[in-house]
Image: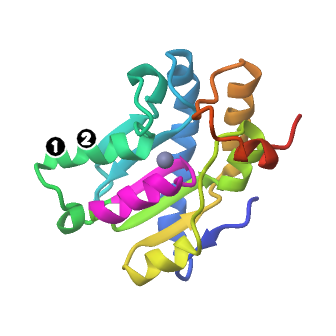
Amino acid sequence: MNTIIANEKIDDVKLAQARKIISGLYREMPEYIARGHGPFLAAIYDEKGNQIAKAANSVITDQCSNHHAEINAIYDAEKTLKTYDLSAHNLSLYITAEPCMMCVGAIMWSGIRAVYFGVPSNGVESITGFDEGFKQDWLNEFKQRGITVYGNIESDSGEKQLRDYMAQNRIVYAPKNNTHIDKKRIKP
Ligand SMILES: [Zn+2]
């Protein structure tokens, strides 16, 4: 069992719900990868457990560097609910991996109330070579902004999906001038 990271006292009901939803996202990942998507999925749920949005990373399929799963899901939720501020809807975001520095910003501006993620960034970077950016103390920063974060949820299963992505020789998209990640990546 992976040790859960959290910025509040762990609530077993919230954690059980997150385990269920994130495990479901891991199971769906292979079909998205087969269609050319990046290996990340995100879903947004309301407090009654209704799914408001679900999206995969579409950087490659859309040829757009900021189409991460979290951004796509937030975009869909805001479009569906016709608002740029989701806070009144008390929504939770479930992600197969820790949000990158861009998505940390996007989540903060969206009004999402809670974030649950699978594989931590250091795992993503060492398995795939994707650069997750720099995010100093973001769990504490989110806590101060009233956003709950739980992470490292069922991450063994998530790591397996990332290893499968790499085993299929899929694209690790990054700007060519970024050589920083090569230093972080653990070569298999
Ligand atoms: Zn991101």
Element under disc 2: helix
Q: Residue furthest front?
A: 177
Query: Which quarter of the picture shows residue 157?
Result: top right
- Residue to which mark 2 is pinned: 76
Graded by Cα atoms within 10 Å as few (under 14), some (14 to 19) or many (20 or more), the crowding at tag 1 reads few
* Residues tagged 2 and 1 counted as in contact (Cβ below 8 A): yes
Residue 40 placement (x, y as % from top left): 53, 38
Question: Residue drawn 68% across and 35% down?
Answer: 162
Q: Nearer the viewer, residue 132 or 73?
A: 132
**In the picture provided, is 24 more to the left or to the right than 127?**
left
* Amino acid type at mark 2: Asp
Q: Secondary structure at mark 1?
A: helix
Q: Which residues are magenta?
A: 92-110
Which quadrant of the structure image shows residue 12? bottom right
- Cα distance in 3D space between marks 2 and 1: 6 Å
Residue 177's spot in the image, x, y percent? 62, 37
Figure quadrant of the N terminus: bottom right
Measured along the vertical axis of the image, is residue 148 above or below residue 72? Answer: below
> Is 171 on the left-hand or right-hand side of 59?
right
* Residue 91 drawn in magenta: no
Q: Amino acid at mark 1?
A: Thr
Q: Identify which residue is drawn at 28% across, 49% down.
A: 50
Magenta run includes residue 95: yes
Residue 47 visible to an observer of this rendering: no
| Image location of residue 31, percent across then percent down | 53, 20
Label 1 CB sits under 8 Å from any ligand 1 atom: no
Q: Tell which residue pokes out farthest to the left in this image.
A: 82
- Front-most of residues 134 and 179: 179
Front-lying residue, 171 or 8: 171
